[in-house]
Amino acid sequence: MKINESERLCYELMTKDDAELMFKLDQDPEVMRYINGGKMTTMDEIKMTYIPRMESYTNKSEGWGMWKIMLKETGDFIGWVLIRPMEFFSEESELDNLEMGWRLMRKYWGKGYATEAAMGFKQALIARGNINKLTAIAFEKNSGSISIMKKLDMTYIKTDIHKDPLGDLEVVFYQLDVV
């Protein structure tokens, strides 16, 4: 799947060679606050857990994976966008319902980059077809991510437990029906 560059941003599918970028992003307790309460990820966790997880759902032709967000002007890495089927790590993976997520370095917050990137991915995924829904989840207090979900025309569905092998979390679910 091709993701078109936006006005200020370009994108590239992440690989195991991007472990250092993933590590650097996760070293800010504020970035991690609404992920795991502010705990920084270790390089061992990146290499032993997060890289294998990412590789398990990466599918370039479908557009699934973690996509680097880079500034077009400088090529600087500013964060990533996640695309994968909802419930991917369960026996009931929803191939027609894609999860969208994002994580940016704090110095790039409040500049509209996450919204710009998420909009581009939303448009590309809808144009590609073969999905019925786009879903995003966040902690209820993560007003920044919830604001982006609303800008994507997603609506609140429920507050519930999101099951994941790394730990179940109570989150809000926002969703957009695309059919």
Image (cartoon, grey):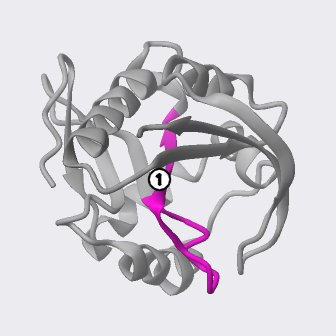
> Quick one: quadrant of the N terminus?
bottom left
Viewer-nearest residue: 27 or 1: 1
Total count of labels: 1
Work out which residue is located at the far top of the displayed protein and give it: 111
> Quick one: quadrant of the C terminus?
top left
Viewer-nearest residue: 68 or 40: 68
Q: Is residue 20 above or below residue 111?
A: below
Pinpoint residue 73: horizontal percent, then vertical percent: 13, 22
Pinpoint residue 93: horizontal percent, then vertical percent: 55, 75
Amino acid under disc 1: Lys
Pinpoint residue 124: horizontal percent, then vertical percent: 24, 40
Work out which residue is located at the far front of the displayed protein and give it: 179
Residue 103 in magenta stretch: yes
Residue 66 in magenta stretch: no
Does 36 sit left or right of 52 as displayed? right
Which residue sits at x=52%, y=86%?
Answer: 48
Pinpoint residue 3: horizontal percent, then vertical percent: 17, 42
Which residue sits at x=33%, y=62%?
Answer: 64
Main SS, magenta residues: strand
Which residue sits at x=58%, y=29%?
Answer: 154
Q: Which residues are magenta?
A: 84-105
Viewer-nearest residue: 116 or 110: 116
Does 141 sit left or right of 34 as displayed? right
Which residue sits at x=36%, y=27%?
Answer: 119
Viewer-nearest residue: 85 or 116: 85
- Disc 1 crowd rating (10 Å Cα; few below 14, some 14-19, many 20+) is some
Q: Is residue 144 above or below residue 55?
A: above
Question: Which quadrant holds residue 60?
Answer: bottom left
Give the SS element for disc 1. helix
Q: Is residue 108 above or below residue 80?
A: above
Q: Which residue has dot 1 on it?
A: 24
